[in-house]
Amino acid sequence: MGTPLVGSGATVSRVLALAAIALGLGGLGVAALTDQAFIDGYTADGSALVVSFAPPGQCDQMIRVRALESDDAVTLDLLGLGAPAFVPTNASQPICTARLELAAPLGGRELRVASGETVAAVWASVGR
């Protein structure tokens, strides 16, 4: 079975275990602060897609700004850092702009958000 740790070996094991727990909890905290941005508008110009969006935090706190393409859709993945849900935020919301180069023009493909919903359905759900 092995010899149980005693003395300095046990102390090192406890410290490593506590460090692992702290890192895990820190990772959960960061994950809780991430959210997708709200698409405010977009224009398609050839193979370029210019997207305006309201980030969960500030414009410089975006983690990922990308477009994932398939034959029938372009999915926007706009992930950013924001405040926890229980923290009040400023009433003024910044609007950011990103220019994304697509492999092919948007054309008749649907534009979707990361959850898979179309941008039109998301806008309809908020009365736009």
Image: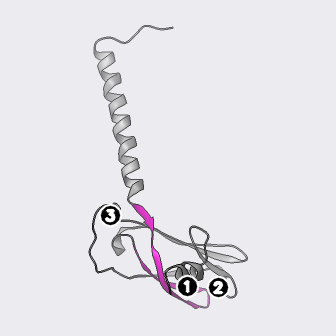
Residue pointed to by mark 1: 49
Residue pointed to by mark 2: 106
Q: Nearer the viewer, mark 3 or mark 2?
A: 3
Vertical side of 123 occupied by 20: above or below: above
Looking at marks 1 and 3 on the same chain, the residue that comes earlier in the sequence is marked by 1
Name which quarter of the figure residue 19 lies in. top left
Position of residue 45 measured from the top left corner of the image (x, y, whole percent): 58, 92
Q: Are marks 2 and 1 in contact (CB under 8 Å)?
A: yes
Quick one: SS at disc 1?
A: strand
In the rendering, which numbered label is found on residue 83?
A: 3
Q: Amino acid at mark 2?
A: Leu
Name which quarter of the figure residue 90 lies in. bottom left
Q: Residue at x 57, y 80 (%)?
A: 119
**Real-space CA distance between mark 1 and mark 3, rounded to the nearest whole angstrom:** 28 Å
Q: Is residue 116 left or right of residue 87?
A: right
Q: Amino acid at mark 1?
A: Leu
Looking at marks 2 and 1 on the same chain, the residue that comes earlier in the sequence is marked by 1
Quick one: SS at disc 3?
A: loop
Q: Nearer the viewer, mark 1 or mark 3?
A: 3
